[in-house]
Image (spheres, rainbow, N blue to C red):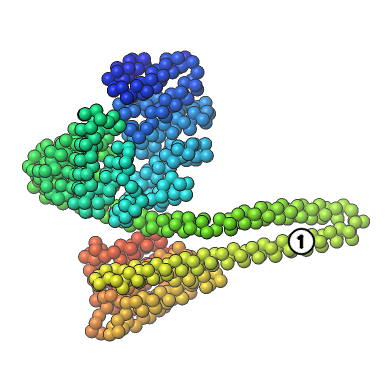
Amino acid sequence: MKKTVPYFLFLYFGFTLSVVDAQSSSLQNKLQALQLISVENSNARESSLRILAVWDSLNTNHHNMIYQLVPIHYWEKVLKKKYNQAIEEKDEEVQIKAAYALAHVYYVQLKIKETLPLIDFLYANKSKLTNKQYGSVLIKKEEIYRFYKDIGKAVKIRNERVLNGFINTYWELYFAAGLYNEAIQDFKSFERLPERPFRNRMMYYVHLGDMYFESKQLDSAYKYYRVGLKETDIYLDKIKRKEIIEEGNFPYWRGWFMGLMANCLVEKEKYAQAKPMLEYYLKLSPTEYRINSMIPLSICYFHLGEIDKGKIYLDSAQFLLKHTMYGPNEFKFLKAKSEYYKSKSDMDSAYLFLEAYNKKKELYEAGLLKNQSLLLLGRMEIDNRRTELKLTQKDLIKIKEDSSLQKKQLYLSLLGLILLAISTALILINYRQKIKSKNIVEAKNIELAAFAEINFQKSQYNEQLIKELHHRVKNNLQNVYSLLNIQKRRISDDETKDFVTSIQSRINSMAIVHESLYRDDMSDSVDFEQYVRNLIDHVKHTFEKKDQKIAISYAFDPVNLSLEKIILLGLIINESVSNVFKYLHTDRGNQLFISLQVYTDECVLSIRDDGPGFEPKKVNKTSLGLKLIKMMVKQLEASYSITSGNGVEHRIQFKI
């Protein structure tokens, strides 16, 4: 007989249940049933299914209530055992149910690495999940990708959620990608303040406050956190007067809002006001959430002269972060460490940690920039797909019918080939049937020729579709370009106009690629020289002033490059040439030299001018153009160098 759960644990659970209010009587009954299941253990599979049913019935939005009744480490132990048993016994039904429950338990404890393989397993078996389970798996899969800042994969899952009717907003993805203003707009457009339940209503204020906080609009963030705090106090008062029933951990929510408000005060350097609020939040926080108050609290202590006390909290935060040292928490820790050494007057150590903070944050922000592009492209794609689904529903039905007809034609063609083979064999066996067999072969050859002609027409049709796709992409990019042009006319600030013009120039560099692919018979590559000349003409038209002329010299070895490479090179050329026009000499003529040397399996692109030049060390930290060039070079897997003396030269060496 297999040993399951020690009986004394259930005595503990029974004691816990005895102090729960009357509204939890149904939970008591379920846990008593769980005790009987464990004690009987007459049938391991039946016991597993019944335990999983009890967990599922307890799995509401208020996870804290579940894990107050039964400690989470117990659930983890039991569910992990049931999951492994199901794998050994090859019981797919129990394995799926146990994986679903265990994934939730891991996720609540922020054990992301343990959660991900379970979620991937459930996603692979999504056809066997209920609609509710399928929606829950998609949420967690997307949230895990957002945690790791893999916005490309998160966008795909969000699109799947949208197409299946689970959600219609994108603000979480905008928030994760650092597009905070877009997140606020999307949130306010689609989310409504819930009437009930309490948890959803409070999360509304948390989410909106967080978006304002990250966008550095601290007053607005503080306002929403404060509204949440006031509503929590109203709920607590009603519970005290027994007007409503507890439906969540209200004291913790109160502490959470206090901590969020305190973070705003820390950002404003109001450490004395923030300190007691963070101490209050820390007392109410479970272990896995204490990190949220420890780091800002240590900063308060450092600035208020309680350095040793702040050091204790900072060391505790480091211990909690050792397995999850990633993203913003890491930045906050490094910055707090710098503050500690600064308060100790150890400026060398303070500088080292500040440098580490700046480097980590720069890498993080570079990842955000890439994810922002993926997110905007993904959103455009899903919007187009939804529009097309509405407009072409009848066309889809027709396509299905045509597909069915094509399958029949394929079967007939295969049958014809088989008959041809039989006919050939009969010719060799029976010479007397030569004339008759010859006629059969000729007939089959005609049939094959007709089939080949059909295939040729289909091939031409597919090529036309690809060209049409490039044409539509080019048109869409031009539409975006035009919209930006309209908006630019309404802008009075020159700096903003220049910024919009730069964006337009980058969009145009991509549009020219798709235009070239549309016009060229070769649908898989672009002539480099023709593309660059068109691109330079546009940049020249955009940036060249009447009193400032640039003489441009070209030297290109002939080569055709793929779509991916030509787009990346186009963006690099656009950024470097735009800078030439922006910063050229005003007192003499200017020269721009662009060359491409093609070797056996690689190319060397050189963009050189005789302008005023610059100091790369000073520009690297502030120039968005240089950052974009380096990002494009990295995606090309190319080597890059820049020299600046009498002018600037960019040199990129890449594989064909």
Horizontal and vertical percent position of residue 647: 27, 75
Horizontal and vertical percent position of residue 439: 85, 61
Q: Is 641 drawn above or below residue 387 in the view shown?
A: below
Q: Nearer the viewer, residue 75 or 364?
A: 75
Quarter of the image for residue 235 reads: top left
Image point (34%, 83%), residue name: 551
Residue marked by disc 1? 447
Q: Is residue 330 something one can see in this rendering? A: no
Q: Is 74 drawn above or below residue 109 in the view shown?
A: above
Horizontal and vertical percent position of residue 539: 36, 75
Q: Is 207 drawn above or below residue 129 in the view shown?
A: below
Q: Nearer the viewer, residue 84 or 126?
A: 126
Quarter of the image for residue 4 reads: top left
Q: Amino acid at mark 1?
A: Glu
Q: Nearer the viewer, residue 254 or 277?
A: 254
Image point (7%, 42%), residue name: 305
Q: Is residue 161 something one can see in this rendering? A: yes
Horizontal arrangement in the rendering, residue 401 relative to residue 478 (left or right): right
Q: Is 404 drawn above or below residue 463 in the view shown?
A: above
Image point (74%, 61%), residue name: 448
Horizontal and vertical percent position of residue 90: 53, 29
Question: What kind of element bears circle 1?
Answer: helix
Horizontal arrangement in the rendering, residue 529 relative to residue 183 (left or right): right
Horizontal arrangement in the rendering, residue 336 relative to residue 131 (left or right): left
The number of numbered discs placed on residues in the rendered structure image is 1
